[in-house]
Amino acid sequence: MRRGRGGSDNTKRGAIFSAARIGARVAELGRQISRGCGGKRLDVVITMDRGFVFAADLIRNIDAPAVCHFVRADVRDVDQGGHARREVAFGRDPT
């Protein structure tokens, strides 16, 4: 695992989970997905602004052909008749 800025093994002050624990869980998710897709092509939808690093780690742990689709999330708060609501729209333009 890569070392954090402080030179430690990614156990920064305030960190809830260690890099090793996260890596082990991502590897397990990859194995579960591999079993579930049975070697069939897997289409992976990834949000550019938040999900690409996690997706890269996860895909490396999946034993199946994968096609990545990158989308951009547009999040906005909307007032609808006095009630606040959050809208999330996804587009293909990753700019």
Image (cartoon, rainbow, N blue to C red):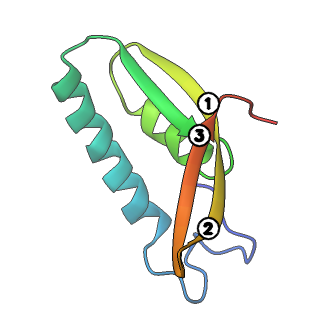
**Circle 3 — which element?**
strand
Query: Regarding mark 1 in the picture, which secondary structure is present there?
Result: strand
The spot of residue 5 in percent (x, y) is 75, 71
Amino acid type, mark 1: Phe
Q: Residue drawn at (54%, 66%), measured in percent from left and top?
A: 86
Which residue is painted at 34% across and 44% down in the image? 27
User: Which residue type does callout 2 highlight?
Assistant: Val
Describe the element under mark 2 as helix, strand or loop.
Answer: strand
> Viewed as shown, does residue 73 lie left or right of 43?
right
In the picture, measured across the screen, residue 16 lies left or right of residue 88, that is left
Compared with 38, 82 (above or below) is: below
Residue 19: % across, % down: 49, 64
Check disc 3 and report the residue beneath it. Answer: 90
The residue wearing badge 1 is 70
Of 82 and 66, which appears nearest the observer? 82
Q: Quadrant of residue 30?
A: top left
Furthest residue toward bottom: 13
Say whether disc 1 or disc 2 marks the residue closer to the N-terminus. 1
Foreground label between 3 and 2: 2
Marks counted in the figure total 3
Marks 3 and 2, Cα distance to the nearest angstrom? Answer: 16 Å
The x and y percentages for residue 80 are 54, 70
Residue nearest the observer in this picture, 30 or 75: 75
Label 3, residues with CA under 10 Å away: few <14, some 14-19, many ≥20: few
Q: Where's residue 54, x and y in %?
A: 52, 47
Q: Is residue 36 left or right of residue 72?
A: left
Q: Examine the rendering and report whether any part of residue 51 can be seen.
A: no
Q: Which residue is mark 2?
A: 78
Residue at the extreme front = 81
Q: Is residue 79 visible?
A: yes
